[in-house]
Image: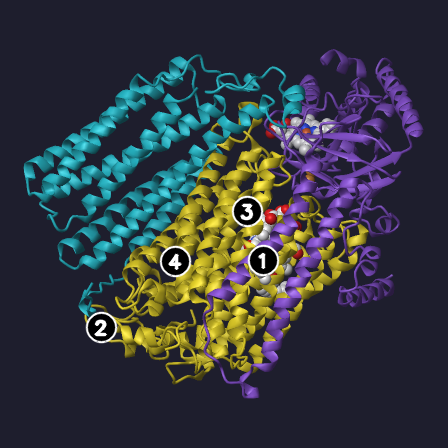
Amino acid sequence: MATTTTEIEADIHAHDDHNHGPEPGLMRWVKTTNHKDIGYLYMWFAFSMLLIGGAMAMVIRLELLMPGLQYVEPQFFNQMTTMHGLIMVFGAIMPAFVGLANIMIPPMIGGPDMALPRMNNWSFWILPFAGAMLLSTMFMEGGGPAFGWTFYAPLSTTFAPDSTDFFIFAIHMLGFSSIMGAINIIATVMNLRASGMKLMDMPLFVWTWFITAFLLIAAMPVLAGAVTMMLTDRNFGTSFFDAAGGGDPVMFQHIFWFFGHPEVYIMILPAFGIVSQIIPTFARKPLFGYSSMVYATASIAILSFVVWAHHMFLTGMPVAGQMYFMYATILISVPTGVKVFNWVTTMWRGSMSFEIPMMWAVAFVILFTIGGLSGLMLGIVPADIQYHDTYFVVAHFHYVLVTGALFSIIAGVFYWLPKWCGNMFNEKLATIHFWWAVISVNVLFFPMHFLGLAGMPRRIPDYSLQFADFNWIASIGGFAFGLSFILLAYIVVDCIRNGKPVKEARVWESAKGLEWTLPTPAPYHTFTEEPPRELILKESSHSAH
Amino acid sequence: MQQSKDQYYVPEGSYWPIVGSIGMAFLLGGFASSLHGSGLGAGLAVLGLVIVVFMVFGWMGQVVSESEGGYYNQQVGKSFRIGMGWFIFSEVMFFAAFFGAMFYAREFSIPWLAGEGNNMWTAKLLWPEFSANWPLVKMPNPETFAVPSALVHAWGIPAINTMLLLCSGATLTWAHWALYNKKRDQLIYGMIATITLGVIFLGFQAYEYAHAYGDLNLKMTSGVYGSTFFLLTGFHGFHVTLGTVMLICILMRIIRGHFTPENHFAFEAVAWYWHFVDVVWLGLFIYVYWFTG
Amino acid sequence: MLNNRFFSTLFKILTLSLLAVPGLAFAEYGLNLPEGVTPISRDIYGLHMTIFWVCVGIAVLVFGVMIYSMINHRKSKGAVASNFHESTTIELVWTIVPLLILIIIAVPATRVLIDLEDTSKADMTVKITGYQWKWQYEYIDAEGEGINFFSNLAQKSRDGIKNAAIRSSDENYLQDVDKRLVLPVDTRVRFLMTSNDVIHSWWIRDFGVKQDANPGFINDAWAYIEKEGVYRGKCTELCGKDHGFMPIVVEVVSKAAYAKWVADEKAAAAAAAASGDREWSMDELMTQGAKVYSTNCAACHGVTGAGVPGAFPAMTGSPIVVDADKIPAHIDIIINGKSGTAMQAFGKQLSDSDIAAVVTYERNAFGNNTGEIVQPAEIKSAR
Ligand code: HEA
Ligand code: HEA
Ligand code: CUA
Ligand SMILES: [Cu+2]
């Protein structure tokens, strides 16, 4: 835990009556109720999972480098695909966003900490156990889950190895953790917000997370229900997903995607929030269309619950269902478009400079839009007949997840890191890292569009010869992109350990927001006194004050 | 809301969460291994359960003593309320998944298996013998399932149970009223009545299960109706059990003289929970037992 | 070889930048969907191109404005930030205009959708059943009624999976099967999809047909194929270990050739039924058994009979395979499978002689050397 020393130093500046600073030693991290401590734990956990999930992606890309089976057996390949998806979604992206929420929401709303700090600790400390249980399945007889991150029945029920029951309970634990995390965020935003801050004064990162938390509370229990039905179908003779007993394997897909589609927005709404914080800072202009941003976020969230079956156009649903889900799906482009247009207009006639966080934010806007537009193509039912379960879909969701969600996390980390640890990162290295990552990620994922259109299905360990060239390109891009994370790790650790200290509270000269009024590095206890309304209005990133 | 720095309360570090996580991992991991014939698994699961129970009592005990020690203020109470409210909402969504499964089976998969909509060929080639029926007593492939001889009749035990739970909601509200009005005796009687009703409900439910398994051959393995029936009522019964245990704890605290008309969040939380369990039961009674036609 | 790959790769990287050039660069190098050979596939292609260009248009507009502003409105150029941050009019415009664009796309999409879901009229019907990991085709009406066979990955492709030499000499690597689905040209064919175990999905790009095969349910799709030829596709729903090795090949022939094929098939089926009536020698059984084993059983139980621990039992030394008194059980598990596991019932898939051969083979190969022989007649009586 490289942050320990800085944290303890930070504590010297904090003075609080009934709360002492952090305990020394390892137990501090186990027992902590401090929102920042917990947030950092989340971030480190997410980063480790990113490396593990990424290493699995490297295995996938290595096997797909050339036709033929070179390095792994098909069953193991399927485990890699499945675990890669699960770990990235539940282990890397979601915990990273929860971590950012933990660290940043209290300072952004002028609060002291999270509303339910002990529960906050529990939300985190379930994760390593759940992650360990999930990973342990790979070492059991018959191997780990090999049925895709969507674990469709009956491949995951009747035809799955024994280890699947461990997988099921790992999902239960992950879900429990996410629900508690979400409850905490809702309670914090509703109850610990400085009294001078009205809802429509909240920074967008807070808004998007607030809405995301509702998505989590509504979606995660449904996933818990789905895996519970799997458990009883596997072990106790129920027949939810078995036609012979009146059930339906497609019912599993409905339940899964009722969770699964909101889940993908859970992974993008906070990203929208981060980018909406960064762009105004470096365009030196208030965010354009603040209230429309809030309404668009809410519309996306609501719509996300009524479009789930667009993942199931080919399951044989009635044609009326296909039509409805097509219209509802493409409708989401409208509020999302509003967001993109607002960002572009915020940049328009600003006075822009391109520090590292801004570069990532710009890359986000462009590449996420590409991913969103391919999503729109997927939403058209007849066309989806040709796209479904091919690499076109893989390309789509990596553009929205990697260059969307993951890029926004990287942007956010660069934006707030100096505030957290009090040091500036090495900007030269960070620039190299940016270009390296952005170029290689496109070499990695752009050709996948062509592979999909040319007919390559997803989740296959080997392919016929006409796909060889693009797979080769994608794999090379993949290895390059993978290496960029080693550089990223170096930049972050180097910044924490030996970075040039930053004196100013306002690390980026034109940044607005309460978090920038706190001293740098941020004190152990956030606002111990409530900020007054004048300050809140002055720091509002979207008003012209 | 006027806040100053003294009003913010951030608790000390705590071991309970990590204890809870370890307990949970043992409980679930052990259960999973026991499903595959590991004797050690069952032991681990029991150990995990003990740890979890220990954690719940320890954690709640700490909260109680902090609360009684006067550390909390209105703001903390409000956080707890928001937390409990949204936790209950998440439970609602959990039940929604099972209700959804039941409606799907009833409205879609069973009629489809019998050939409705664009499924003519399904019926013709795969299940020629099958015709749609709900509650499903005649499965598409009866050979591999326990075929029930009859169903649980709505106007027997389930109707009585509905009355019991509705009454328990009333007695709990009575107790709450008594708490507000400092009528300690009535408060305790109200609590005892509620707990008793809950326990009787559970007794009837257990009897009904025994009857269904023993006499009617209606089992979890009786096709999708049996699956939804037992999972819905089973999870509900589990929640009633938890609710009853929580009510008992609240009763103990009342007897020890905790709670004031102004400060009784724990009581309220448990009451909400109990009403939620009540409402779920109404849904069950209507859709699982009553309107099955 | 390497050089070739290198240059073709380089060439393709260059063509990427030519994306803006429609059509020509696309089709030839497999960058885009093909138009296909059915009315539906052409409609889909049209839709695909329409939305594609709409998306390109939107992207050019949005990125254009953004890049213009990034170039001109930067601090280092002395740009001074203006302070506007709200305009209801413009928000309305960029809500309504995209909405209109969506409606314009949705109309033709709906038309094609209704068309492709209408399977009511058809000249013939083929039932397609997915198995782990092969396809079964049953002609259930019209001329070919009664024809029923399985289609496995071709042996040459299977051999090439771990052998680069075979692979590079196999132009249809992983796209070839041992027995093709044969269909007549200019005929409205209805496909019925279902599965015997997990979910599979049957996809021929050139027909514009992709449909999930769900166990216990039947989905339908149709195609009117206008051009003779060989069309290749893949299973597109993850269906377990060998999901990647479950290709589909359809041969579309003239109506006359189709009639001849039907007659040949029926004659062959009659001959196969007769082969079970005679006594077979050990050698014959072993040769036939090795063939049956490698197409039907090796995928799970392994080429060497070692299985996959925890998933598929080994054949080497398994009591049911080596104990003399378990011959009936051995035959039984092959004929009836074991429900609730991946071990499927082979009774309807294999003839008496094939089952006899594979039983004999398993009992004598992989070092089992029991010396026991099982004759087709025993299978017949066991059924
Ligand atoms: C962060 C995650 C994320 C996000 C944000 C999205 C966003 C969208 N997704 Fe995606 N999607 C996934 C993650 C995500 N998706 C994943 C993981 C899968 C695969 C799951 C699996 O099977 O494993 C998937 C799969 C998937 C499918 C199923 C494909 C298939 O399996 O056949 C579909 C189909 O409709 C779809 C559609 C969309 C649409 C319409 C959007 C929209 O929200 C996009 C909206 C954005 C824009 C359109 C761009 C910006 C807008 C403008 C510039 C305005 C102008 C635009 C217009 C007027 C059109 N997605
Ligand atoms: C949520 C986020 C997320 C993220 C960040 C990623 C990141 C990546 N994904 Fe992921 N992916 C999914 C979510 C995600 N993916 C999902 C949901 C699926 C579907 C699963 C399914 O089908 O069920 C999927 C499927 C998927 C496939 C399809 C597999 C298949 O269908 O068989 C592929 C194939 O190329 C792929 C590749 C990659 C690569 C190369 C990265 C890279 O961006 C990863 C980069 C990171 C690293 C490489 C780690 C850091 C570096 C090291 C550990 C050092 C070692 C480095 C080297 C050895 C070079 N992914
Ligand atoms: Cu069959 Cu994939
Ligand atoms: Cu979706």
| Letter of the purple chain | C
The chain to which mark 4 is attached is A
Measure the alpha-carbon separation of dots 4 and 2. Answer: 28 Å
Measure the alpha-carbon separation of dots 3 and 4. Answer: 24 Å
Q: Which residue is drawn at 47% across and 34% down?
A: A229
**Disc 2 on helix, strand or loop?**
loop
The chain to which mark 2 is attached is A
- Residue B165 lies in quadrant: top left
Label 4 or label 2, whichever comes before in sequence order: 2
- Give the residue number, with chain letter if any, for mark 3: A328
Measure the alpha-carbon separation of dots 2 and 1. Answer: 53 Å
Nearer the camera: disc 3 or disc 2 = 3
Measure the alpha-carbon separation of dots 4 and 1. Answer: 27 Å
- Give the residue number, with chain letter if any, for mark 2: A16
Disc 1 CB within 8 Å of nearest ligand 1 atom? yes
- Give the residue number, with chain letter if any, for mark 1: C98
* Residues flagged by tags 3 and 2 on a common chain: yes
- Residue C367 lies in quadrant: top right
Colour of chain A, in one word, is yellow
| Letter of the cyan chain | B
Dot 2 amino acid type: Asp
Residue A18, x across and y down, in percent: 19, 68
Nearer the camera: disc 4 or disc 1 = 1
